[in-house]
Structures are given as structure tokens and as C-alpha cells.
Image: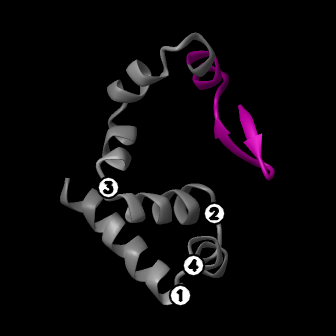
Amino acid sequence: MGTFAGKRVFDESWLQAAEDGSLPRVVSQDPRFSAILALPDFERFVYVLSVLEGCTDLECATLLGVSPQQIEETRLRALQHFWKR
């Protein structure tokens, strides 16, 4: 597994797919990534930063230039997209 800040974020098959050009095909066949890519842009950024990367609301807010409350509300909307599926 590849790591970022001590967290496992991808396995080597994804790295290989990125290097050989087959990543778009791999991603399009994975329903988890399709669901994430279907999110509106800002919700996708918030979801990836806060849920997948584990950033705090304050860290996300600082990176995206919004309030921590907006991060919390946006993350909830993103998660609601998944619950509806």
C-alpha cells in the first residue's frame, strides 16, 4: 500500500494503472470512485479532504477558504448523496 502522512491511501495496483495509462478504465469500473466523481466539485473536495484524507474541519476550511461550519454542512450533503444511492 502507498502511504501519505502515515495513512494507507492506495495500493500499488493503482500506481501501476496510473503509470501504464489504464487508470481511467480502472476508476470507471469501481463504483466507489464513480460515486465520488458524481459529487459536485466542492462537495467532492470536502469529502476527499475530510473523509478520505482525514483532515480536520479547520484544516479543510483553511485550505478551501471557507468556514469550518461550511465544511461540516458540505460533508453532510456529500454523505447524503451516498445514502440516497
Dot 3 falls on a residue whose secondary structure is loop
Report the mark closest to the observer, 3 or 4.
4
Alpha-carbon span between mark 4 and mark 2: 18 Å
Whether tag 1 and tag 3 are in contact, CB under 8 A, the answer is no
Q: Which residue is mark 4?
A: 65
Identified at 55% across, 86% down, the residue is 68
Q: Find residue 39 and name its label.
A: 3
Disc 1 target residue: 67
For label 4, count other residues whose C-alpha is less than 10 Å away and answer few (under 14), some (14-19) or many (20+).
few
Which of the two labelled residues, at mark 3 and mark 2, occupies the earlier sequence position? Answer: 3
**Dot 1: few (<14), some (14–19), or many (≥20) neighbours within 10 Å?**
few
Quadrant position of residue 61? bottom right
Residue at image position (31%, 59%) is: 40
Circles 3, 2 touching at the beta carbon (< 8 Å): no
Residue 22 spot, x, y in % from top left: 48, 14
Across and down, in percent, residue 59 comes to 67, 75
Question: Of marks 3 and 4, which one's residue comes earlier in the chain?
Answer: 3
Q: Residue most toward the right?
A: 6
Q: Earlier in the sequence, mark 4 or mark 2?
A: 2
Look at mark 2 in the image and give the residue it sits on.
54
Q: Percent position (x, y) of residue 70?
A: 45, 84
Disc 3 to disc 4, how far (Cα)?
19 Å
C-alpha span from label 1 to label 3: 20 Å
- Say which amino acid is labelled 4: Gly
The answer to whether marks 3 and 4 mark residues whose Cβ atoms lie closer than 8 Å is: no
Comparing marks 1 and 2, which lies closer to the viewer?
A: 1
| Between marks 1 and 4 in the image, the one whose residue lies nearer the viewer | 4
The residue furthest top is 20
Stretch in magenta: 1-17
Disc 3 from disc 2: Cα separation: 18 Å
